[in-house]
Image (spheres, rainbow, N blue to C red):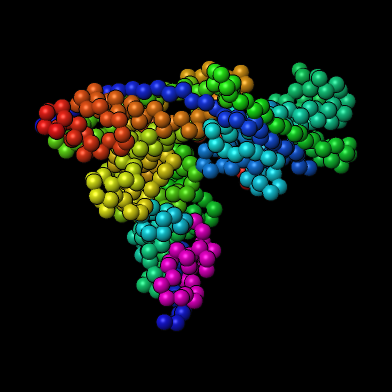
Amino acid sequence: MPSQIVSLVVNGEPREFIARPGVTLLAVLREALGLTAAKRGCAQGSCGTCTVLVDDRPAPACLIAVETVADCSVRTLEGVAVGGNLDEVQSSFVDNFATQCGFCTAGMIMVAEALLDRDPDPSEEDVAEAISGNVCRCTGYRPIMIAILDAARRRRGESVEGIEGTAPARPAEEAVSR
Amino acid sequence: MAKLRGRGYASVNYPTGMNLGGDPSQALIHSTTTGTFVITLSSVDLGQGIKTIAAQCAAETLGLPIENVLVDTADTDTGPHCMGTFASRGTHRVGNAVIMAAAEARGVMLEVAAEELEVDAADLETDGTGLIKLKGSDEKSIHITDLALAAHFKHGRTISGRGIFLKEPSTPVPETGEMDPDSCQAHACTAAFVEVDDETGVVEVLELYNVYEIGRALNPAMATQQVEGGAWMGLSHALFETTEPYYPRRDHGPRDFAEYLMPGPADIPVQHSLFLERPAGNGPYGAKGIGEMTANAPIPAIANAVFDACGVRLTAMPFTPERVLRGLDALRGNA
Protein backbone atom coordinates (compact mmCIF):
# COMPACT_ATOMS: atom_id res chain seq x y z
CA MET A 1 0.00 0.00 0.00
CA PRO A 2 1.28 3.43 -0.84
CA SER A 3 1.55 6.29 1.59
CA GLN A 4 -1.51 8.47 1.66
CA ILE A 5 -2.53 11.94 2.64
CA VAL A 6 -4.37 11.89 5.96
CA SER A 7 -6.32 14.75 7.49
CA LEU A 8 -6.92 15.30 11.19
CA VAL A 9 -8.28 18.13 13.25
CA VAL A 10 -5.60 18.56 15.89
CA ASN A 11 -6.37 20.86 18.80
CA GLY A 12 -9.02 22.54 16.67
CA GLU A 13 -6.84 23.09 13.62
CA PRO A 14 -7.10 21.07 10.38
CA ARG A 15 -3.80 19.33 9.64
CA GLU A 16 -2.73 17.27 6.63
CA PHE A 17 0.28 15.03 6.28
CA ILE A 18 1.60 12.09 4.33
CA ALA A 19 1.47 8.84 6.29
CA ARG A 20 2.81 5.38 5.55
CA PRO A 21 0.21 2.65 6.09
CA GLY A 22 0.05 1.66 9.73
CA VAL A 23 2.06 4.55 11.10
CA THR A 24 0.76 5.34 14.58
CA LEU A 25 -1.09 8.44 15.62
CA LEU A 26 1.62 8.93 18.24
CA ALA A 27 4.39 8.94 15.64
CA VAL A 28 2.47 11.44 13.52
CA LEU A 29 1.84 13.74 16.47
CA ARG A 30 5.43 13.64 17.68
CA GLU A 31 7.39 13.45 14.45
CA ALA A 32 5.23 14.99 11.72
CA LEU A 33 3.42 17.62 13.78
CA GLY A 34 6.02 18.28 16.46
CA LEU A 35 3.57 17.76 19.32
CA THR A 36 5.74 15.93 21.85
CA ALA A 37 3.59 16.08 25.00
CA ALA A 38 2.22 12.57 24.40
CA LYS A 39 5.06 10.19 25.28
CA ARG A 40 6.10 6.81 23.95
CA GLY A 41 6.30 4.72 27.10
CA CYS A 42 5.59 1.03 26.52
CA ALA A 43 4.40 1.29 22.90
CA GLN A 44 1.91 -1.50 23.58
CA GLY A 45 -1.02 0.34 25.15
CA SER A 46 -0.19 -0.58 28.75
CA CYS A 47 1.15 2.58 30.34
CA GLY A 48 -1.13 5.38 29.17
CA THR A 49 1.52 8.04 28.78
CA CYS A 50 0.64 8.48 25.08
CA THR A 51 -3.03 9.18 25.88
CA VAL A 52 -4.75 11.76 23.68
CA LEU A 53 -8.44 12.42 23.12
CA VAL A 54 -9.85 11.14 19.83
CA ASP A 55 -13.29 12.62 19.30
CA ASP A 56 -13.25 13.51 23.02
CA ARG A 57 -12.48 9.98 24.22
CA PRO A 58 -9.13 8.97 25.70
CA ALA A 59 -7.15 6.69 23.44
CA PRO A 60 -3.63 5.26 23.43
CA ALA A 61 -2.02 7.02 20.48
CA CYS A 62 0.70 4.35 20.30
CA LEU A 63 -1.79 1.68 19.19
CA ILE A 64 -3.81 3.64 16.65
CA ALA A 65 -2.94 3.45 12.96
CA VAL A 66 -3.47 7.05 11.94
CA GLU A 67 -5.45 6.27 8.80
CA THR A 68 -8.13 4.65 10.98
CA VAL A 69 -8.86 7.98 12.66
CA ALA A 70 -8.71 10.11 9.51
CA ASP A 71 -10.78 13.30 9.80
CA CYS A 72 -11.28 12.75 13.54
CA SER A 73 -10.74 15.42 16.14
CA VAL A 74 -7.59 14.85 18.20
CA ARG A 75 -6.84 16.76 21.35
CA THR A 76 -3.41 16.70 22.96
CA LEU A 77 -1.97 18.35 26.04
CA GLU A 78 -0.73 21.17 23.82
CA GLY A 79 -4.37 22.10 23.18
CA VAL A 80 -5.38 22.28 26.85
CA ALA A 81 -3.91 25.58 27.95
CA VAL A 82 -5.63 28.50 26.30
CA GLY A 83 -3.57 31.57 25.52
CA GLY A 84 -0.77 30.40 27.78
CA ASN A 85 -3.08 30.05 30.77
CA LEU A 86 -3.19 26.67 32.48
CA ASP A 87 -6.68 25.23 32.76
CA GLU A 88 -8.18 23.91 36.01
CA VAL A 89 -6.68 20.44 35.66
CA GLN A 90 -3.19 21.71 34.87
CA SER A 91 -3.16 24.33 37.62
CA SER A 92 -4.52 21.78 40.08
CA PHE A 93 -1.70 19.38 39.16
CA VAL A 94 0.78 22.18 39.88
CA ASP A 95 -0.83 23.29 43.14
CA ASN A 96 -1.30 19.75 44.46
CA PHE A 97 2.22 18.72 43.46
CA ALA A 98 0.86 15.86 41.37
CA THR A 99 3.92 15.38 39.21
CA GLN A 100 7.38 14.17 39.93
CA CYS A 101 9.39 13.05 36.90
CA GLY A 102 6.54 14.20 34.66
CA PHE A 103 6.60 11.34 32.18
CA CYS A 104 3.03 10.22 32.96
CA THR A 105 1.66 13.74 33.41
CA ALA A 106 0.50 14.45 29.86
CA GLY A 107 -1.52 11.22 29.77
CA MET A 108 -2.90 11.74 33.27
CA ILE A 109 -4.12 15.22 32.40
CA MET A 110 -5.79 14.03 29.19
CA VAL A 111 -7.75 11.25 30.93
CA ALA A 112 -8.70 13.78 33.62
CA GLU A 113 -9.96 16.19 30.95
CA ALA A 114 -12.11 13.46 29.42
CA LEU A 115 -13.42 12.41 32.83
CA LEU A 116 -14.39 15.93 33.86
CA ASP A 117 -15.94 16.65 30.47
CA ARG A 118 -18.41 13.79 30.94
CA ASP A 119 -18.72 13.92 34.75
CA PRO A 120 -18.15 17.24 36.50
CA ASP A 121 -18.52 15.68 39.94
CA PRO A 122 -16.65 12.36 39.94
CA SER A 123 -16.20 10.23 43.04
CA GLU A 124 -12.79 9.07 44.20
CA GLU A 125 -13.60 5.65 42.70
CA ASP A 126 -14.47 7.29 39.38
CA VAL A 127 -11.09 9.02 39.37
CA ALA A 128 -9.26 5.81 40.25
CA GLU A 129 -11.02 4.03 37.41
CA ALA A 130 -10.35 6.85 34.95
CA ILE A 131 -6.59 6.78 35.55
CA SER A 132 -6.36 3.01 35.98
CA GLY A 133 -4.85 2.66 32.51
CA ASN A 134 -2.12 5.18 33.28
CA VAL A 135 1.02 4.10 35.10
CA CYS A 136 2.81 6.46 37.48
CA ARG A 137 6.00 5.12 38.97
CA CYS A 138 6.84 8.15 41.15
CA THR A 139 3.95 9.51 43.13
CA GLY A 140 1.99 6.51 44.35
CA TYR A 141 -1.11 8.00 42.61
CA ARG A 142 -2.55 9.74 45.66
CA PRO A 143 -1.43 13.29 44.72
CA ILE A 144 -2.78 12.75 41.20
CA MET A 145 -6.18 11.63 42.46
CA ILE A 146 -6.33 14.58 44.85
CA ALA A 147 -5.42 16.95 42.01
CA ILE A 148 -8.16 15.62 39.73
CA LEU A 149 -10.81 15.85 42.47
CA ASP A 150 -9.60 19.38 43.21
CA ALA A 151 -9.73 20.27 39.50
CA ALA A 152 -13.36 19.10 39.43
CA ARG A 153 -14.18 21.46 42.30
CA ARG A 154 -12.39 24.32 40.54
CA ARG A 155 -14.25 23.65 37.31
CA ARG A 156 -17.54 23.66 39.20
CA GLY A 157 -16.53 27.02 40.61
CA GLU A 158 -16.29 25.84 44.21
CA SER A 159 -13.81 27.30 46.63
CA VAL A 160 -10.61 25.33 46.97
CA GLU A 161 -9.87 26.70 50.44
CA GLY A 162 -9.99 24.35 53.36
CA ILE A 163 -10.50 21.12 51.45
CA GLU A 164 -9.61 18.17 53.58
CA GLY A 165 -7.08 15.83 52.14
CA THR A 166 -5.37 18.14 49.67
CA ALA A 167 -1.64 17.95 49.12
CA PRO A 168 0.41 16.52 52.00
CA ALA A 169 2.62 19.56 52.16
CA ARG A 170 2.44 22.91 50.47
CA PRO A 171 4.65 23.17 47.42
CA ALA A 172 7.80 25.09 48.21
CA GLU A 173 9.36 27.41 45.68
CA GLU A 174 9.13 26.19 42.14
CA ALA A 175 12.19 24.63 40.60
CA VAL A 176 13.95 27.40 38.77
CA SER A 177 14.95 26.00 35.45
CA ARG A 178 13.80 28.16 32.64
CA MET B 1 -13.55 -17.51 56.58
CA ALA B 2 -12.72 -13.98 57.54
CA LYS B 3 -10.83 -10.85 56.74
CA LEU B 4 -8.09 -10.67 59.34
CA ARG B 5 -6.47 -7.41 60.30
CA GLY B 6 -2.90 -6.98 61.49
CA ARG B 7 -0.20 -4.42 61.93
CA GLY B 8 3.56 -4.54 61.72
CA TYR B 9 6.50 -2.24 61.58
CA ALA B 10 10.04 -2.18 60.27
CA SER B 11 12.94 0.24 60.51
CA VAL B 12 15.80 1.06 58.19
CA ASN B 13 19.15 2.78 58.51
CA TYR B 14 20.40 3.94 55.15
CA PRO B 15 23.78 5.33 54.07
CA THR B 16 24.18 8.62 52.23
CA GLY B 17 26.83 8.20 49.54
CA MET B 18 29.21 5.40 48.65
CA ASN B 19 32.91 6.08 48.39
CA LEU B 20 34.85 2.94 47.54
CA GLY B 21 36.82 4.85 44.90
CA GLY B 22 36.30 8.34 46.24
CA ASP B 23 33.05 10.17 45.68
CA PRO B 24 33.24 13.71 44.25
CA SER B 25 30.80 16.09 42.57
CA GLN B 26 31.48 19.55 41.24
CA ALA B 27 29.43 22.69 40.72
CA LEU B 28 30.25 25.93 38.94
CA ILE B 29 28.24 29.11 39.29
CA HIS B 30 28.41 32.43 37.52
CA SER B 31 26.28 35.52 37.28
CA THR B 32 24.97 36.73 33.95
CA THR B 33 25.24 40.44 33.25
CA THR B 34 21.75 40.92 34.65
CA GLY B 35 22.25 39.04 37.90
CA THR B 36 20.90 35.59 37.15
CA PHE B 37 23.18 33.03 38.76
CA VAL B 38 23.65 30.01 36.51
CA ILE B 39 24.61 26.80 38.28
CA THR B 40 26.35 24.40 35.94
CA LEU B 41 26.23 20.75 36.96
CA SER B 42 26.37 17.31 35.39
CA SER B 43 23.93 15.79 37.84
CA VAL B 44 20.87 14.23 36.27
CA ASP B 45 17.41 15.24 37.47
CA LEU B 46 15.20 12.25 36.72
CA GLY B 47 12.35 13.58 38.81
CA GLN B 48 13.94 13.36 42.23
CA GLY B 49 14.35 17.12 42.27
CA ILE B 50 18.10 17.81 42.33
CA LYS B 51 17.58 20.96 40.25
CA THR B 52 15.21 22.37 42.84
CA ILE B 53 17.51 21.45 45.71
CA ALA B 54 20.57 22.94 43.94
CA ALA B 55 18.63 26.16 43.29
CA GLN B 56 17.49 26.32 46.92
CA CYS B 57 21.03 25.78 48.25
CA ALA B 58 22.43 28.46 45.91
CA ALA B 59 19.71 31.02 46.70
CA GLU B 60 20.13 30.48 50.43
CA THR B 61 23.92 30.84 50.26
CA LEU B 62 23.90 33.84 47.91
CA GLY B 63 21.17 35.54 49.91
CA LEU B 64 19.18 36.15 46.75
CA PRO B 65 15.66 35.17 45.63
CA ILE B 66 15.39 31.71 44.10
CA GLU B 67 14.09 33.42 40.95
CA ASN B 68 17.67 34.66 40.44
CA VAL B 69 18.98 31.11 40.16
CA LEU B 70 18.98 29.02 36.98
CA VAL B 71 20.19 25.42 36.95
CA ASP B 72 21.88 24.11 33.82
CA THR B 73 22.63 20.45 34.22
CA ALA B 74 23.14 17.04 32.70
CA ASP B 75 25.34 17.82 29.71
CA THR B 76 28.23 15.65 30.78
CA ASP B 77 30.28 16.68 27.73
CA THR B 78 30.56 20.23 28.96
CA GLY B 79 29.56 20.34 32.63
CA PRO B 80 31.78 19.91 35.67
CA HIS B 81 32.08 16.32 36.76
CA CYS B 82 29.50 14.51 38.87
CA MET B 83 29.84 10.86 39.90
CA GLY B 84 26.12 10.46 39.32
CA THR B 85 22.78 10.42 41.01
CA PHE B 86 22.94 7.13 42.89
CA ALA B 87 23.60 5.93 46.43
CA SER B 88 21.18 8.60 47.72
CA ARG B 89 24.05 11.04 47.26
CA GLY B 90 22.69 13.86 45.07
CA THR B 91 21.37 16.25 47.70
CA HIS B 92 24.37 15.68 49.98
CA ARG B 93 27.22 15.82 47.43
CA VAL B 94 25.78 18.26 44.93
CA GLY B 95 24.21 20.42 47.62
CA ASN B 96 27.57 20.79 49.35
CA ALA B 97 29.34 21.56 46.05
CA VAL B 98 26.72 24.18 45.17
CA ILE B 99 27.03 25.81 48.59
CA MET B 100 30.83 26.01 48.19
CA ALA B 101 30.52 27.54 44.72
CA ALA B 102 27.81 29.97 45.80
CA ALA B 103 29.84 31.06 48.85
CA GLU B 104 32.77 31.97 46.58
CA ALA B 105 30.45 33.85 44.22
CA ARG B 106 28.85 35.64 47.16
CA GLY B 107 32.32 36.79 48.27
CA VAL B 108 32.96 38.37 44.87
CA MET B 109 29.44 39.83 44.82
CA LEU B 110 30.07 41.56 48.13
CA GLU B 111 33.54 42.78 47.04
CA VAL B 112 32.13 44.44 43.94
CA ALA B 113 29.21 45.85 45.94
CA ALA B 114 31.70 47.29 48.43
CA GLU B 115 33.47 49.14 45.60
CA GLU B 116 30.20 50.41 44.17
CA LEU B 117 28.92 51.62 47.54
CA GLU B 118 32.35 52.73 48.80
CA VAL B 119 32.07 50.76 52.00
CA ASP B 120 33.82 47.74 53.54
CA ALA B 121 32.61 44.38 52.18
CA ALA B 122 32.42 43.01 55.73
CA ASP B 123 29.75 45.60 56.50
CA LEU B 124 27.41 44.40 53.75
CA GLU B 125 24.45 42.05 53.98
CA THR B 126 21.87 40.57 51.64
CA ASP B 127 18.17 40.88 52.40
CA GLY B 128 16.87 38.02 50.27
CA THR B 129 14.94 40.29 47.89
CA GLY B 130 17.86 41.04 45.57
CA LEU B 131 19.39 43.96 47.47
CA ILE B 132 22.93 44.07 48.79
CA LYS B 133 22.99 46.72 51.50
CA LEU B 134 25.02 48.31 54.24
CA LYS B 135 24.08 46.66 57.54
CA GLY B 136 21.62 48.79 59.43
CA SER B 137 21.15 51.23 56.57
CA ASP B 138 18.30 51.47 54.10
CA GLU B 139 20.04 54.16 52.06
CA LYS B 140 23.24 52.46 50.97
CA SER B 141 22.16 49.51 48.85
CA ILE B 142 22.46 48.16 45.32
CA HIS B 143 20.25 45.71 43.47
CA ILE B 144 21.89 42.57 42.10
CA THR B 145 20.92 43.50 38.54
CA ASP B 146 22.74 46.84 38.75
CA LEU B 147 25.61 45.18 40.55
CA ALA B 148 26.02 42.44 37.94
CA LEU B 149 26.03 45.04 35.14
CA ALA B 150 28.63 47.11 36.99
CA ALA B 151 30.81 44.07 37.68
CA HIS B 152 30.93 43.18 34.01
CA PHE B 153 31.06 46.56 32.27
CA LYS B 154 32.79 48.72 34.88
CA HIS B 155 34.90 46.63 37.22
CA GLY B 156 35.89 43.80 34.90
CA ARG B 157 35.00 41.17 37.49
CA THR B 158 33.26 37.83 37.10
CA ILE B 159 30.86 37.07 39.92
CA SER B 160 31.51 33.37 39.96
CA GLY B 161 32.46 30.44 42.12
CA ARG B 162 33.71 26.87 42.07
CA GLY B 163 32.59 24.08 44.31
CA ILE B 164 33.45 20.46 44.87
CA PHE B 165 32.53 17.95 47.51
CA LEU B 166 34.78 14.95 47.87
CA LYS B 167 34.29 12.04 50.19
CA GLU B 168 37.74 10.47 50.11
CA PRO B 169 38.25 6.80 49.23
CA SER B 170 38.05 4.33 52.04
CA THR B 171 39.04 0.69 51.81
CA PRO B 172 38.19 -1.94 54.37
CA VAL B 173 40.77 -2.96 56.97
CA PRO B 174 41.44 -6.59 55.98
CA GLU B 175 41.50 -7.96 59.51
CA THR B 176 38.33 -6.29 60.79
CA GLY B 177 36.40 -5.18 57.71
CA GLU B 178 36.22 -1.74 59.27
CA MET B 179 35.79 1.15 56.86
CA ASP B 180 34.19 4.53 56.41
CA PRO B 181 31.92 4.09 53.42
CA ASP B 182 29.31 6.81 53.78
CA SER B 183 28.92 10.37 54.99
CA CYS B 184 25.96 9.93 57.29
CA GLN B 185 22.98 7.65 57.75
CA ALA B 186 19.31 8.42 57.54
CA HIS B 187 16.76 6.48 59.57
CA ALA B 188 13.15 5.59 59.00
CA CYS B 189 10.32 3.49 60.32
CA THR B 190 7.13 2.39 58.60
CA ALA B 191 4.11 0.87 60.31
CA ALA B 192 1.71 -1.03 58.05
CA PHE B 193 -1.93 -1.89 58.70
CA VAL B 194 -3.17 -4.73 56.51
CA GLU B 195 -6.17 -6.93 55.93
CA VAL B 196 -5.70 -10.56 54.88
CA ASP B 197 -8.55 -12.48 53.32
CA ASP B 198 -8.02 -16.03 54.62
CA GLU B 199 -10.22 -17.48 51.89
CA THR B 200 -8.60 -15.85 48.86
CA GLY B 201 -5.18 -15.09 50.33
CA VAL B 202 -5.35 -11.51 49.10
CA VAL B 203 -3.43 -8.98 51.20
CA GLU B 204 -4.67 -5.40 51.21
CA VAL B 205 -2.61 -2.62 52.74
CA LEU B 206 -4.98 -0.18 54.43
CA GLU B 207 -2.64 2.39 55.95
CA LEU B 208 1.06 3.21 56.11
CA TYR B 209 2.63 5.43 58.74
CA ASN B 210 6.07 6.70 57.75
CA VAL B 211 8.52 8.52 60.00
CA TYR B 212 11.81 9.70 58.51
CA GLU B 213 14.88 11.20 60.13
CA ILE B 214 16.75 12.67 57.14
CA GLY B 215 18.81 15.41 58.76
CA ARG B 216 16.84 18.32 57.40
CA ALA B 217 14.09 18.11 54.79
CA LEU B 218 15.34 20.88 52.49
CA ASN B 219 12.07 20.76 50.57
CA PRO B 220 9.33 19.17 52.69
CA ALA B 221 6.87 18.83 49.79
CA MET B 222 9.38 16.95 47.65
CA ALA B 223 10.58 14.87 50.59
CA THR B 224 7.00 13.87 51.40
CA GLN B 225 6.40 12.85 47.81
CA GLN B 226 9.67 10.89 47.83
CA VAL B 227 8.57 9.03 50.96
CA GLU B 228 5.06 8.23 49.77
CA GLY B 229 6.04 7.40 46.19
CA GLY B 230 8.82 5.20 47.55
CA ALA B 231 6.39 3.49 49.91
CA TRP B 232 4.20 2.76 46.89
CA MET B 233 7.19 1.07 45.26
CA GLY B 234 7.79 -0.92 48.43
CA LEU B 235 4.14 -1.96 48.53
CA SER B 236 4.41 -2.90 44.88
CA HIS B 237 7.42 -5.14 45.53
CA ALA B 238 5.79 -6.58 48.65
CA LEU B 239 2.52 -7.61 47.02
CA PHE B 240 2.78 -7.54 43.23
CA GLU B 241 6.02 -7.26 41.30
CA THR B 242 7.85 -10.28 40.02
CA THR B 243 9.20 -11.50 36.72
CA GLU B 244 8.69 -15.08 37.88
CA PRO B 245 5.44 -16.94 37.35
CA TYR B 246 2.96 -16.88 40.19
CA TYR B 247 2.27 -20.54 39.59
CA PRO B 248 4.68 -23.30 38.72
CA ARG B 249 4.52 -23.04 34.96
CA ARG B 250 6.58 -20.31 33.35
CA ASP B 251 3.82 -19.41 30.89
CA HIS B 252 1.72 -18.16 33.77
CA GLY B 253 4.33 -15.48 34.45
CA PRO B 254 4.38 -12.01 32.98
CA ARG B 255 5.71 -11.94 29.44
CA ASP B 256 5.81 -8.19 28.95
CA PHE B 257 5.00 -4.87 30.52
CA ALA B 258 1.28 -5.41 29.96
CA GLU B 259 1.26 -8.42 32.30
CA TYR B 260 3.72 -7.14 34.89
CA LEU B 261 1.61 -6.42 37.93
CA MET B 262 1.81 -3.21 39.93
CA PRO B 263 -0.72 -1.63 42.28
CA GLY B 264 -2.99 0.82 40.54
CA PRO B 265 -4.74 3.90 41.90
CA ALA B 266 -7.47 1.75 43.50
CA ASP B 267 -4.91 -0.37 45.41
CA ILE B 268 -3.17 2.37 47.36
CA PRO B 269 -3.28 2.79 51.14
CA VAL B 270 -3.79 5.96 53.08
CA GLN B 271 -0.36 7.28 54.04
CA HIS B 272 0.70 9.44 56.95
CA SER B 273 4.24 10.78 56.82
CA LEU B 274 6.33 13.00 59.00
CA PHE B 275 9.94 14.05 59.42
CA LEU B 276 12.16 14.25 62.44
CA GLU B 277 14.91 16.78 61.78
CA ARG B 278 18.36 16.12 63.25
CA PRO B 279 20.67 18.13 60.96
CA ALA B 280 23.75 16.21 59.80
CA GLY B 281 26.97 18.10 60.49
CA ASN B 282 28.43 17.40 57.04
CA GLY B 283 25.18 17.76 55.05
CA PRO B 284 24.12 20.80 53.02
CA TYR B 285 22.11 22.80 55.54
CA GLY B 286 22.00 19.55 57.50
CA ALA B 287 20.42 17.31 54.84
CA LYS B 288 21.02 13.59 54.44
CA GLY B 289 20.00 11.47 51.45
CA ILE B 290 16.48 10.09 51.15
CA GLY B 291 16.43 8.70 47.62
CA GLU B 292 16.65 4.93 47.84
CA MET B 293 15.60 4.15 51.38
CA THR B 294 11.94 4.95 50.93
CA ALA B 295 11.03 1.60 49.33
CA ASN B 296 12.77 -0.42 52.04
CA ALA B 297 10.85 -0.26 55.29
CA PRO B 298 7.34 -0.85 53.89
CA ILE B 299 8.21 -4.36 52.67
CA PRO B 300 9.17 -5.98 56.01
CA ALA B 301 6.51 -3.87 57.74
CA ILE B 302 3.87 -5.44 55.49
CA ALA B 303 5.37 -8.91 56.05
CA ASN B 304 5.17 -8.37 59.80
CA ALA B 305 1.60 -7.12 59.51
CA VAL B 306 0.61 -10.23 57.53
CA PHE B 307 2.15 -12.37 60.27
CA ASP B 308 0.25 -10.38 62.90
CA ALA B 309 -2.99 -10.77 60.95
CA CYS B 310 -2.93 -14.49 60.15
CA GLY B 311 0.20 -16.08 61.57
CA VAL B 312 1.81 -16.71 58.19
CA ARG B 313 5.51 -15.81 58.14
CA LEU B 314 6.45 -14.95 54.55
CA THR B 315 10.10 -14.67 53.59
CA ALA B 316 9.90 -14.32 49.81
CA MET B 317 8.39 -11.47 47.83
CA PRO B 318 5.85 -10.86 46.51
CA PHE B 319 3.32 -11.92 49.13
CA THR B 320 0.96 -13.43 46.59
CA PRO B 321 -2.40 -15.00 47.39
CA GLU B 322 -0.89 -18.40 46.63
CA ARG B 323 1.92 -17.96 49.17
CA VAL B 324 -0.48 -16.68 51.82
CA LEU B 325 -2.84 -19.62 51.24
CA ARG B 326 0.01 -22.15 51.32
CA GLY B 327 1.10 -20.61 54.62
CA LEU B 328 -2.42 -20.82 56.00
CA ASP B 329 -2.69 -24.45 54.86
CA ALA B 330 0.56 -25.25 56.69
CA LEU B 331 -0.78 -23.63 59.86
CA ARG B 332 -3.98 -25.66 59.58
CA GLY B 333 -2.05 -28.85 58.99
CA ASN B 334 -3.38 -29.12 55.44
CA ALA B 335 -0.04 -28.71 53.70
Q: Residue at x 52, y 22 (%)?
A: B185
Q: Position of residue B262 (x, y in %)?
A: 33, 44
* Residue range (magenta): A13-38
Look at the image and tell me whether residue A135 can be seen.
yes
- Say whether residue A31 is magenta: yes
Q: Position of residue B64 (x, y in %)?
A: 69, 31
- Can you say whether A106 is above or below B182 in the image? below
The residue nearer to you, when weighing B57 against A156, is B57
Image label count: 0
Q: Residue at x 35, y 38 (%)?
A: B237
The residue nearer to you, when weighing B154 against B333, is B333
- Say whether residue B144 is magenta: no
The residue nearer to you, when weighing B67 against B211, is B211
- Can you say whether B330 is above or below A174 in the image? above
Look at the image and tell me whether residue B58 can be seen.
no
Q: In the image, B144: left or right of B315?
A: right
Q: Position of residue B20 (x, y in %)?
A: 60, 30
Q: Quadrant of the image for the N terminus of chain B?
A: top left
Q: Quadrant of the image for the C terminus of chain B?
A: top left
Q: Position of residue B318 (x, y in %)?
A: 30, 37
- Furthest-front residue in view? B175
Q: Which corner quadrant of the image does residue A8 belong to?
A: bottom left
The residue nearer to you, when weighing B186 against B228, is B186
- Furthest-bottom residue in view? A2
Q: Residue at x 47, y 49 (%)?
A: A103
Q: In the image, B119: left or right of A141?
A: right
